[in-house]
Amino acid sequence: MATEETLVLVKPDGVARGLTGAILARIEAKGYALVDIRLVEPDRETLARHYAEHEGKPFYEPLLEFMLSGPSVAIRLAGNRVIEGFRSLAGTTDPTTAAPGTIRGDFGRDWGLKVQQNLVHGSDSVESAERELAIWFA
Ligand code: DAT
Ligand code: MG
């Protein structure tokens, strides 16, 4: 048993499109536990901390602009192997090629914008989860 916690964000496109409930339904159907959930409107500094690993990459600035474009929903999620489990539910980064059956594969597509609006974020490791949860659930 490896009970873990992870940070999930329903990004501004997911909230704006009214997909929060559909995404939460998949998370709950999978059996993960909602430990905490909140609507967030992060400032640039918070997003820079969250996406520090991507600073300097070509998509970094458009990514921050997109994340500043509207509210997100932050979720502290718990469960056995939930870190890789949620990333599996989310699908791969590019929504155009994410597998059908995943959140990104079913609801996302390339909108022709600079940043892939791929609906959700999920921590990618135990270390990332601890770091990110401290940012969003201080
Ligand atoms: P993930 O969200 O699947 O963990 P990531 O951490 O590599 O992906 O990147 C963070 C976000 O940045 C991702 O959700 C969407 C955006 N992004 C990543 N790679 C991109 C690219 N090549 N072009 C445009 N946006 C990108
Ligand atoms: Mg990532």
Image: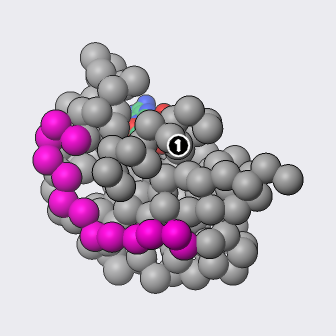
Residue type, mark 1 in image? Ala
Is 95 on the left-hand or right-hand side of 26? left
**Location of residue 48 by image quarter:** top left
Ligand 2 has an atom within 8 Å of the beta carbon of the residue at disc 1: no
Query: In this orientation, which residue lies closer to the viewer: 70 or 79?
Result: 79
* Residue sitting farthest toward the front: 138
Which residue sits at x=49%, y=53%? 7
Query: In this orientation, which residue lies closer to the viewer: 36 or 84?
Result: 36
Instruction: Say if the magenta span includes residue 42.
Output: yes
Q: Position of residue 19 (x, y in %)?
A: 42, 77
**Location of residue 79 by image quarter:** bottom right
From this viewpoint, is residue 26 visible? yes
Which residue sits at x=38%, y=45%? 134
Q: Position of residue 59 (x, y in %)?
A: 31, 30
* Residue sitting farthest toward the right: 1
Report helix, strand or loop for mark 1.
Answer: helix
Which residue sits at x=38%, y=62%? 74
Instruction: Say if the magenta span includes residue 53.
Output: no
Q: Which residues are magenta?
A: 34-46
Is 43 on the left-hand or right-hand side of 118? left
Query: In this orientation, which residue lies closer to the viewer: 89 or 37?
Result: 37
Q: Which residue is identified by label 1?
A: 129
When the figure is inspected, residue 68 is found, relative to residue 79, above or below; the finding is: above
Which residue sits at x=18%, y=60%? 41
Is 42 on the left-hand or right-hand side of 121? left
From this viewpoint, is residue 116 visible? no
Circle count: 1
What color scheme is it?
one colour
Q: Residues within 10 Å of mark 1 (few under 14, many from 20)?
A: many
Q: Position of residue 130 (x, y in %)?
A: 50, 41
Is 63 on the left-hand or right-hand side of 105? left
